[in-house]
Amino acid sequence: MLMVAVSMVVFSLVSLSPVDPVAANVGQAALSGMSDEKLATLQAYWGKDVPLVERYASWVSGLLRGDMGDSLRFNAPVAQVVAQRAANSLVLMGIAWLASGVLGLALGIAAGVRRGGAADRLVKASCFVLAASPTFWVALLMLIVFGVVLGWFPIGFSAPIGKAAADVTWLDAFHHLALPAITLSVVGVANVALHTREKTIDVMGSPYVRFARARGESTGSVVIHHGLRNLVLPALTIQCSQIAEIFGGSVLVEQVFSYPGLGQAAVSAGIGGDTALLAGIALVSAALVFGGNLVANILYGVVDPRMRKEYSRG
C-alpha cells in the first residue's frame, strides 16, 4: 500500500506541476518556430493531453507486467536508467553510510568518555554546526576547498572527461567518488555522534563500569570490554533510521558534483516532466527507506526487549 501511495503522489504532483515537458525538453526557442503539426506530435509523444487517471492506469498495468515504462528524457527504458544510476548511487551511499556510522561512533565515544573536556566540546560544536548546515552548502564548500583550491580531487563526474568507459580503471572511479562520499559522510556524522555521546555518558556512569574501574581497569579497557557492546547496537539503529536522510543528501551531493546517480536523474526527470522515470526512482528510493526503517525497528527490539513485549501485546 505504501508503494501504491508513493506512485499516486508522484503522478499527481507531476500533473500539478507547471513544467511543460515539451518546452522543457525541446527549448523555448525551438518551440516558438515549430509548426502546429510537429507540436501536436511532440505533445502526443509526451502524453501531455492524456488524463492523469488514464496515464496512471496505463503505467500500473505495465508495472504489473514488469515494465516500468520508457524514460522520454533519456530515451531508454526506465528499468535500464534506474539500474545504471542505482549502481553509482548505492556505492556512494553505502560508503557514506558505513563511514559516517564508524566515524560518528568513534567521535561519540571519545566525547562521552571525556565529558566536559576539550574533545567533548570540540565534537559537540562540530556536530551542532554540521547538523545546522545545509547539505548543498557543505558540498559546495568541499568542492571549492578540495577540488578547486587544493586540486586533490576532480570537480565532478564519475570518470575522467574524454576517457572511454572501457579505459576507466577502479582507481579513476574511486578518485571521482571520494569527494562526494566524504561530503555525504561528514553530513551524516552529527546524529550518530551526539546520540552515542549520551549513551557513553550513561554507560560510563553505570555500576558495572564503576566496579571495573575500582578493580583498576583503564578507561580504554572499560570501554572496549564493558561499554562497546552496549554502544554499537544503538548507534547502528540510529544509522539505519538515517537511510532516508542519506538518500536525500545524496540528491544534493550528486547535483553539486555532477555525479551520475539516482539523485541527479530524479532532478533531471522532475525538471523535464519525465513522469515514468520519476515514478520509478520514487519506488526504488521508497523501498530503500522502508527497508532501512524496518531494519531499524528490528534493531530497536534487539536493543530494548521491552519494545518486543509492547509489539506482542499490540
Image (tube, rainbow, N blue to C red):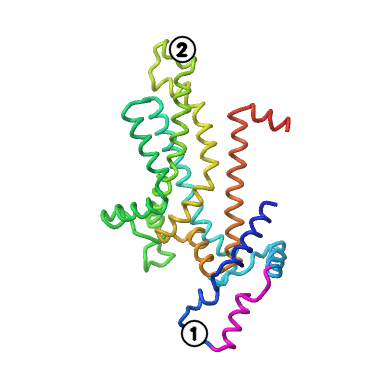
- Residue at 45 percent across and 44 percent down: it is 188
Q: Is the magenta stretch mostly helix, strand or loop?
A: helix
Quarter location, residue 153: bottom left
Image mark for residue 199: none
Mark 2 falls on what kind of element?
Answer: helix
The magenta stretch is 35-52
Image mark for residue 32: 1
Quarter location, residue 219: top left
Q: Residues within 10 Å of mark 2 (few under 14, many from 20)?
A: few
Marks 2 and 1 close (CB-CB < 8 Å) = no
Tell me if residue 47 is in the magenta stretch. Answer: yes
- Residue at 45 percent across and 26 percent down: it is 200
Q: Which residue lies furthest to the top in this view?
A: 215
Distance from disc 2 to disc 1, alpha carbons, whole Å, reads: 81 Å
Vertical side of 275 occupied by 170: above or below: above
Vertical side of 202 occupied by 263: above or below: below
Q: Position of residue 149 (x, y in %)?
A: 26, 55
User: What kind of residue is marked 1?
Assistant: Ser
Indicate which label's residue lies in the foreground, 2 or 1.
1
Image mark for residue 211: 2
